Amino acid sequence: MPRFTVHIRDEWVAVACRDTSNTIRWLGQEALKRYMKNKPDNGGIGSVRETRFIVRRCQGLGLLDADDTIDDVLEDNDFVELAIEGDTMSSDFIPCEPGVSNITAAYKEPDAYISLDGDSLTSTDLVNLGRGLYKIKVMIKPCVFLSVVIFDLMGSLSQTCFFLSQLTPEAERKVVQSRELLDTIVKENKVVYGITTGFGNFARTVIPVSKLKELQENLVRSHSAGLGNPLSPERTRMLLALRINVLAKGYSGISLETLEAMIQAFNASCLSFVPEKGTVGASGDLAPLSHLALGLMGEGKMWSPKSGWADAKYVLEAHGLKPISLKPKEGIALINGTQMITSLGAEAVERAQAIAQQADIIAALTLEVLKGTTKAFDSDIHSLRPHPGQTEVALRFRSLLDSDHHPSEIAESHRFCERVQDAYTMRCCPQVHGIANDTIKFVQNIINTEINSATDNPMVFAERGETISGGNFHGEYPAKALDFLAIAVHELASISERRIERLCNPSLSELPAFLVNEGGLNSGFMIAHCTAASLVSENKVLCHPSSVDSLSTSAATEDHVSMGGWAARKALRIVEHVEQVLAIELLAACQGIEFLRPLRTTTPLEKVYDLVRTVVKPWIKDRFMSPDIEAVHRLLLDQKVWNVAKPYIEKYQTEYIPESRPVSPTAFSLDPPASPRKRVRHE
């Protein structure tokens, strides 16, 4: 029988529907009857039939017509919100804001699976898991020890069967051995931190065996003290996936049953309400991970594509899932670690890498519009200062701008100009963009190491027969790395804003002021440049490193912390600003091309221009500009600019190398070259 869950004021009621030809009005009235039945004063509602209300879907907030049939507009187990006329929307109800995330807007259940073993996940994989491209399949290796033995509070051991893993006899022995170690600790009343004691400053408080389950549950509840907006569905999926990956390493003592429940929740996209604020980055990301675990326990709020935001127990039930029941040590296993910092850091570094690649393409297009030279990208110059990023960026510029390989009518038009050299914002791109690229790779290495690290406490070493308390939960590594990333990637926007100034300033560009005809009547890119400047200025403040700060917490037990959660969040904001500034530069450069027609630039840059023109028309006269910037920003987010130019870059780089020549003393040659530079094809 179809059933629908209806949210009225501060409560959820379930309504069974034998006949789906009934109307939405009938559904609302039935829900009101159930709501009134549980209230001594009928909830202040006089008559069901006379009460006026509206009904909307929880997912997407779409209004439902009262006369529509249930069969036409709802699916079994749908979640709906009923708002009584005169009421404000309940503070308990958390709407999904349309457009906030791709998952919220349109979610398609993936068919592909990815295996997690705790050792081989990458930042790219993690971001793709967040985007909903994969479900999870855990691959337990022989060295992993996850318990299949449950110790009940009466002191008996019982074997439990699971379908998740296919273990060898040796692996099964290790699985049983590890859980038996924890069970033995409990059975013998040993004092072990986090298993039979309190936490933090309560480490010396021994907890009775009969209250160990309550101990773990209280830990999760009390630590769920975060504030702020919830993480987007994508970021919560990343957080949950990363926690699963870390637990799969087998050093946390989690049971196989609990791990399987987490995987089922992930694969159903049942995502807990995780506030973005509240972690100091040691002892791990306690508050965010506690909120993550709280939803899995069936408490607090949860989101799924099917239900939107609702009480966690209802969301789990709608997907046929049961709340997890915590065993000894499992609460601390779920909440202790650096997964909030690391998952957000993975997104930051992946987006930083994508925009750094595209920044080279955008800068190359600007250089063409401003009639700059390619001499500054000569391979011999960069071989004398062989930083990998600088060399790579210079090679990309040659790949895009080499007129001998990709004929450029624009470059040919100023081949014999009298300028000696370009401004730094053009000729120093390899040096400035280069260090950003090198920093991104450095940070990516740290993030990938952290992704596959056990950051729990205490660690369970079954082969040694002991648990050991340590400090792997301290977030200093990813915090410092993400502060470094923020500083480095900011420079891509800083130098881009100066190139935008050159494009808009007629005394520097030889183009119409602010890239528009009939200046005065039209303002063109005047305020778009101001927007870029404001974002760059904001980034300068955000670049202050958060990891240089520390505040003692937990009664001086946790007396040095990383502040890595803020490092990750502001790194993401900085990367977003960089993307937006470069979107403005790309728009401006393409507009500059309009004033150089009929001359054409190189083939790859013409392809980039054509791509932009599929979403934004040329600027003939003033119009609403924000949608244009947002459209081009989306091109950069989807890496379409890189994908258009990449084949040309790769072909140039793999098939042609410049013949080595002595370094010229000047950047420009006033005489025409004697002959085109030779190319040597790689065999």
Image (cartoon, rainbow, N blue to C red):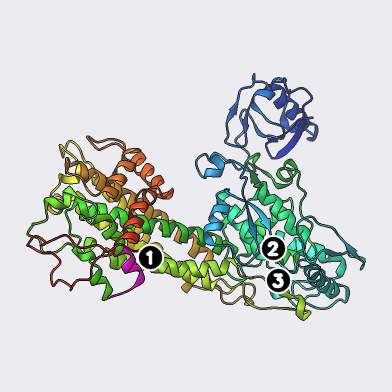
Q: Which residue is mark 1?
A: 437
* Residue 431 location, quadrant: bottom left
State the separation of the CA atoms marked 1 and 2: 35 Å
Q: Which is more toward the observer, 119 or 107?
A: 119
What main secondary structure does the magenta stretch of the protein show?
A: helix
Q: Name the mark nearer the viewer: 2 or 3.
A: 3
Residue 231 at least partly seen: no
Q: Amino acid at mark 3?
A: Tyr
Q: Earlier in the sequence, mark 2 or mark 3?
A: 3
Q: Amino acid at mark 1?
A: Asn
State the image coordinates of residue 240 (x, y, percent, origin top left): 63, 56
Q: Which residue is mark 3?
A: 251
Left or right, residue 45 beside residue 524: right
Which residues fall within the magenta stretch? 385-394
Q: Name the mark nearer the viewer: 1 or 2.
A: 1
Q: Is residue 594 above or below residue 71?
A: below
Tell me if mark 1 has few (under 14), some (14-19) or many (20+) residues whose alpha carbon lies within 10 angstroms of its own. Answer: many
